[in-house]
Amino acid sequence: MKDKEIPNYWTGKCFGCSTVNSYSLRLRFFLSENGCYTKCSVPDYLCGMDGIAHGGMIALLLDEVCEWTLIARIGKMAFTREISVRYLKPVLTNTEIVVEAKIETQDGKNAVLRSTVHSKDNELMAESESKWTLTNPSTIAKISKIDESLLKKFLAKYPVGTSP
């Protein structure tokens, strides 16, 4: 995988990627051939059973890498409409994993993405298919506490058809 980092211009409090939220995982994303990925580890305090990452955290990672794939590849934010996760092997805490997503299909309103979690030895640990509703800044602003102009400025840094 080529390590070309996707700049994170987000100033919000997202639990996955925020640089200002002290509880954030501070995920960093990189371009892959058809999507993007992150390398990370789940800290012990986010375990299910001691030493094993909570399944909800794995779902969060799969979801987060999909959102960043949509931002980086098509310049859009989206809402998760549906996510299906298959847990294949336990993910140990404090162990590096690679979480990657690719756009399977996309039109002007919807997208379907496939995302995976692999061990650093490339063993498949979990996989997901998710369906997304592509949205615009005004819709997000209406239902969140985020100013529409901030959303527009953020997305303008990820133009459609170009790579960061």
Image (cartoon, grey):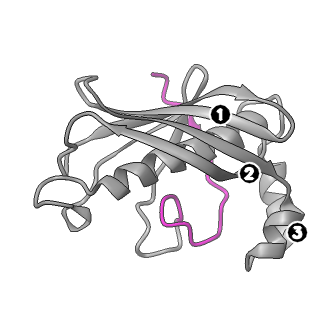
Q: Is residue 13 above or below residue 48?
A: below
Look at the numbered disc 2 and give the secondary structure of its residue: strand
Q: Position of residue 136 (x, y in %)?
A: 85, 55
What amino acid does circle 3 point to?
Answer: Ser
Q: Which residue is mark 3?
A: 149
Would you say the residues marked 3 and 1 are in contact, meaning their CB atoms lie under 8 Å apart?
no
Q: Position of residue 84 (x, y in %)?
A: 48, 42
Would you say the residues marked 1 and 2 are in contact, meaning their CB atoms lie under 8 Å apart?
no
Observer-side mark, 3 or 1, equals 1
For the residue pair 141 and 151, the one nearer the viewer reads as 141
Q: Which residue is mark 1?
A: 112
In this image, 138 relative to 145: left or right?
right
Magenta stretch, residue numbers: 1-18
* Circle number at residue 77: 2
Quadrant where the C terminus is found in the figure: top right
Q: Position of residue 89 (x, y in %)?
A: 21, 36
Q: Position of residue 102 (x, y in %)?
A: 58, 28
Q: Residue at x 42, y 50 (%)?
A: 59
For the residue pair 38 and 139, the one nearer the viewer reads as 139
What amino acid does circle 2 point to?
Answer: Met
